Image (cartoon, grey):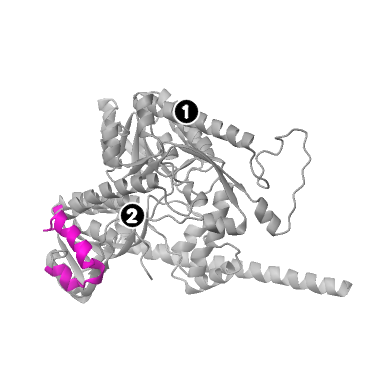
Amino acid sequence: MLKKFFLNFLSSFIGAWVALGLFVAALVIVGISLVAKLGISESSNAGISRHSVMTIDLTGIIEERETPTDIDYMELIRGDISSPMTLTSLTTAIREAADNKDIDMIYLKCGGVSAAPATLRALRNELSEFRKSGKKIYAYADAYAQGDYYVATVADSMFVNPVGTVAVNGISGGVLYYKDLLDKIGVQMQIVKVGTFKSAVEPYISNEMSAPARAQLDTLYGNMWNLMVQEICSSRPLKPAGLNKMIDSDFLQLQDGVFAEQHKLVDKAVYERTMDGRIAAAVGVDEEKLNYVSHSAVAAQSNPLAALSKGKHIAVLYATGEIMEGSKTGINCEALVPVITELADNDDVAGMVLRVNSPGGSVFGSEQIAEALGYFQSKGKPLAVSMGDYAASGGYWISCHADRIFADPLTITGSIGIFGMIPNVAELARKVGVTPQYVATNPEADFPSLLRPLTDTQLAAMQKMIEVGYDKFLTRVATGRKMDKARVAQIAEGRVYDGQMALTLGLVDALGSLSDATEWVKSKLPEKERSKCGIVDYPSVEPGFWDMVRLSTSSELSISLIKEAASYAPEAESAVEMANVLRRRPVQARIVPIQFYATPRK
């Protein structure tokens, strides 16, 4: 027995050291790859010469801005560890390209971009501004997805592979409903809520979408799609009725590039190998002398730290993701509130733009952030909100007291309502052979318990708390927006709105971009400070180990080693999703974000 113990101990000891050795080896390889990668990056930055063409690869996900991320085991297992594009890096690159005398045009290589409509519109607007510089934009795709087609229609010339497609088919979105699954495993979601349209809880208690939920999405999608169609047709020789007719009757995703050319969806159906010649002719150089540069290389030419040396500056504070205390991703009030307080107390911060891209989340976290923003305003500094893809529910909670709110027409906002959700896993416990027993000094000592259903008294108490919280939400909106509380109650009920409708209802002040919000804050400063006032993004982004791994993708060995380590990780996407549900606070102001454009197939 003792011998067996020592053998097991020795094998475990050796195994641990082998694993540690592999990990250290992976670190070394990643480090070498990083150095190589950085070297390549520096040389590419220096490679911007006369008659350069900036390439934007519209493939994959576009996020709001760079954020440090934890290791994603699912990405590792799939072998996909590339960094997503960000709207901030793209807009920075486009503005730099417009001003850089060595860059003559932009080439959009479209391969299936995945982003919400407001992000796509922001990118499209930046490209439209770029064209005012007199420089051209060309776009090509083997197959246009709807998102990159919408962006690319702003180009001077659009090309598609003759056997490619233009897959434009309108907006649709779906939400998975889990009630049958939860019933099978013995989990009951106990719900208390306020708001007829507050549908975030529906997937856990129903198998189908309610009539109010469907009605609000029908209106939302209709408004958003009408705007997108109008903008597409304003850039192409198309009419909205004709485009919609093609979508409905011709199944565009089944038609080839020749059809797209004949019906003016693109300018010409050509093979990609011919694009170098067309671009060379547009730039005015020989084909072999074309100098393509990436958008990241161009963005690197911009110096975001320059504003720091100017003293007074406007802070652009990013609040991106779900509001959840203690989270390393999303909006963590425990991390964000101190930043807001520091900005309020910093004499060099003249004003702030809060960039909100959030479907909401914890009511507690939302209130902590809102209170801190109130402290910032108490210092007499102007505060504007710029809404991104979402600024709904808790995202609207933290926005509504701003001095001025800007939204994109395709922003999803509103959803003024809250709910409580407590799972009851008593049946699941019984199925796996767990029998809970209790001893308590008071009847409600173990409230809320996950191992037995809420009593009528407990549910009534929870409902009262939700109603009090909802009333606080209504009061906050009425005060911040200077509206009658009864009027707020009429347009609340958890209903979501697009930015255009939100403007009509008085929930936002203007339709505009992050730049518009920044300019408004600058306009509120003393005239002598405006020209000297720079812009600085907060919170500062410190790349973590996972971000460095993503940069080191040039090393196949590092990828294989890390994937091997990741294969032992117990995480699965469904398990992570359920864990997120269980770790949320019981009281939420949140909507379910809907993915409008699928990630392109590999």
Tag 2 residue = 300
Residue 346 visible in the displayed image: no
The spot of residue 274 in percent (x, y) is 18, 75
Q: Quadrant of the C terminus?
A: bottom left
How many neighbours does mark 2 have within 10 angstroms: few (below 14), some (14-19), or many (20 or more)? some
Residue 203, percent across and down?
Answer: 48, 51
Q: What residue is rendered at 31% in x and 49% in y?
A: 218
Location of residue 537 (image quadrant): top left
Q: Which mark is residue 157?
A: none
Quick check: marks 1 and 2 in contact, CB under 8 Å?
Answer: no
Between the C-alphas of marks 1 and 2, the distance is: 45 Å
Q: Secondary structure at mark 2?
A: loop
State the residue at coordinates (79%, 40%).
439
Magenta segment's dominant SS is helix
What amino acid type should be assigned to the residue bearing mark 1?
Lys
Residue 478's place in the image compared with 364, above or below, is above
Looking at the picture, which amino acid does disc 2 mark?
Answer: Ala
| Residue 236: in magenta span | yes
Q: Measuring from the top left, give residue 408's x and y in whole percent.
A: 28, 43
Position of the N terminus, as image quadrant, is bottom right
Sequence order check, earlier mark of 1 and 2 = 2
Residue 147 position by quadrant: bottom left
Front in this rendered view, residue 600 or 537: 600
257 magenta-colored? yes
State the image coordinates of residue 275 (x, y, percent, origin top left).
19, 71
Residue sitting at 27 percent across and 57 percent down?
A: 170
Foreground label between 1 and 2: 1
Q: What residue did someone put label 1 on?
A: 472
Whether residue 242 sits left or right of residue 64 in the image: it is left
Tell me which segment is drawn in magenta.
234-262
Q: Nearer the viewer, residue 16 or 109?
A: 109
| Residue at screen point 53% across, 57% down | 180
